[in-house]
Image (tube, rainbow, N blue to C red):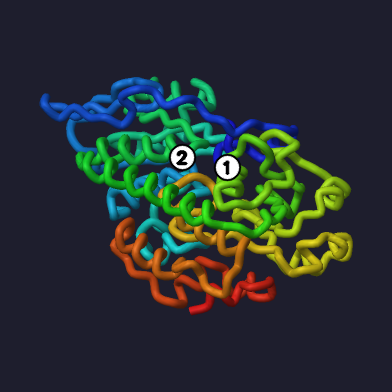
């Protein structure tokens, strides 16, 4: 699986990794409820038979827990999640909106997503969601144990829409997934329309997937580069492919005007501003280093919250004194996805207003 979600740290540090993802298979996310059983087709084009709508679900892929909750508008059917999903829920908004998710067992797999088969069996799941494109060795042990496995791919926006349809089919509410997929496409179209009217020069932006222990950037072919271009900015690391570890000398040569730190490690803008080695980088001199938001899930990788990320990044790239309606969009989307209207202080936490407070133009996101 060639995404920042699925790759273990040791793989990321080996060098370039392309973020393409397998093409969507016809029929993915469909269900057949005309017979006694419910049948869901996963992204392996494999039909999974369930005795009825899934009521006990285990998810291993990092974003799957949040996406499943958004599809279901509830956490009550999750009985096991990956530890990385738990960390995102604990540190982000999901644990506030659904405190029960913090009590769900989160030891169902290793960092490399090898399943804890014995532990998962003890949870008696109706279905287990697992990476399909990381190799059969992390899927077959589950199937050999008699578990129903939904195999998923990831890395492109189309994959996310397919997750919506597949998860909603497994939950017995297929119309919800179709509506969410339509909403996602509309969100992208809206951002494209705004970007098409932008006349200012494209700022040079560098996106870090990891920063604290290694300088791992989002190069050509990544989902992150796609939406950097979507909002009208320039990805300065487009001359390297995939997720690539670089050195400081390379960053100095690129001299980005904007730096974005994602939520896969603990780095904050002050860590960059306070390091004298970075003092000559344009983004540091102009105080344009930002931590990406952390909401119901991390906003940087593909998810149902991606349009919120794109709106935020567009305002970072082209600040105009307003938030582009982002705070209102957060409230609207969270009501739709989570049946929860976040408070101003909850939105501040999502947007890291304190951590990003010293950075240029971040007051545009103030309540």
The residue depicted at 31 percent of the width and 63 percent of the height is 335
The secondary element bearing badge 2 is classed as helix
Res. 246 image quadrant:
top right
Q: Nearest the camera: 257 or 151?
A: 257
Q: Position of residue 80 (x, y in %)?
A: 39, 45
Q: Is residue 317 above or below residue 184?
A: below
12 left or right of 229? right
Res. 101 image quadrant:
bottom left
Q: Is residue 105 visible?
A: no
Sort mark 2 into few (<14), some (14-19) or many (20+) by Cα contacts within 10 Å. some
Sort mark 1 into few (<14), some (14-19) or many (20+) by Cα contacts within 10 Å. some
Spatial CA span between label 1 and label 2: 10 Å
Q: Nearest the camera: 242 or 228?
A: 228
Q: Position of residue 247 (x, y in %)?
A: 84, 45
The earlier-in-sequence mark between 1 and 2 is: 2
Q: Position of residue 319 (x, y in %)?
A: 60, 68
Res. 328 image quadrant:
bottom left
The residue depicted at 19 percent of the width and 29 percent of the height is 38
Foreground tag (1 vs 2): 1
The secondary element bearing badge 1 is classed as helix
235 left or right of 132? right
Task: Give yes or no for contact between labels 1 and 2 (Cβ–Cβ under 8 Å).
Answer: yes
363 left or right of 205? left
Instruction: Identify the residue position indicated by label 1 in the image.
Output: 226
Q: Is residue 220 above or below residue 145?
A: below
Instruction: Identify the residue position indicated by label 2 in the image.
Output: 157
Q: How many marks overall?
A: 2
Q: Nearest the camera: 83 or 321?
A: 321
Q: Position of residue 142 (x, y in %)?
A: 41, 27
Q: Nearest the camera: 142 or 233?
A: 233
Q: Is residue 300 visible?
A: yes
Q: Which mark is residue 111?
A: none
């Amino acid at each position: 699986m060639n995404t920042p979600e699925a790759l273990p740290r040791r793989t990321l540090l080996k060098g370039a990794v392309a973020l393409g993802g397998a093409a969507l298979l016809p029929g993915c996310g469909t269900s057949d409820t005309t017979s006694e059983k419910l049948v869901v087709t996963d992204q392996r084009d494999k039909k999974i038979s369930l005795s009825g709508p899934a009521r006990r679900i285990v998810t291993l892929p990092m974003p799957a827990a949040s996406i499943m909750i958004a599809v279901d508008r509830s956490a009550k059917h999750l009985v096991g999640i990956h530890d990385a999903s738990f960390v995102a829920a604990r540190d982000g908004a999901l644990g506030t909106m659904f405190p029960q998710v913090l009590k769900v067992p989160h030891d169902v797999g290793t960092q490399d997503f090898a399943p804890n088969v014995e532990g998962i069996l003890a949870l008696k799941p109706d279905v287990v969601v697992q990476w399909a494109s990381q190799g059969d060795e992390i899927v077959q042990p589950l199937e050999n144990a008699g578990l129903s496995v939904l195999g998923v791919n990831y890395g492109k926006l189309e994959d996310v829409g397919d997750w919506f349809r597949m998860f909603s089919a497994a939950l017995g509410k297929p119309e919800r997934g179709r509506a969410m997929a339509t909403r996602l496409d509309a969100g992208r179209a809206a951002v494209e329309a705004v970007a098409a009217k932008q006349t200012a020069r494209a700022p040079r932006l560098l996106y870090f997937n990891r920063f604290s222990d290694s300088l791992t950037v989002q190069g050509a072919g990544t989902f992150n580069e796609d939406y950097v271009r979507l909002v009208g900015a320039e990805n300065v690391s487009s001359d390297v492919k995939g997720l690539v570890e670089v050195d400081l000398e390379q960053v100095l040569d690129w001299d980005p005007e904007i730096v974005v730190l994602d939520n896969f490690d603990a780095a904050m803008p002050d860590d960059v501003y306070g390091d004298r080695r970075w003092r000559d980088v344009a983004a540091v001199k102009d105080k344009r280093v930002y931590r990406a938001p952390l909401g119901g899930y991390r906003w940087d990788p593909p998810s149902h919250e991606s349009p919120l990320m794109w709106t935020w990044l567009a305002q970072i790239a082209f600040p105009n004194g307003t938030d582009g309606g982002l705070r209102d969009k957060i409230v609207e989307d969270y009501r739709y996805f989570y049946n929860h209207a976040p408070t101003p202080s909850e939105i501040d936490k999502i947007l890291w207003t304190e951590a990003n407070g010293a950075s240029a133009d971040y007051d545009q996101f103030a309540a």
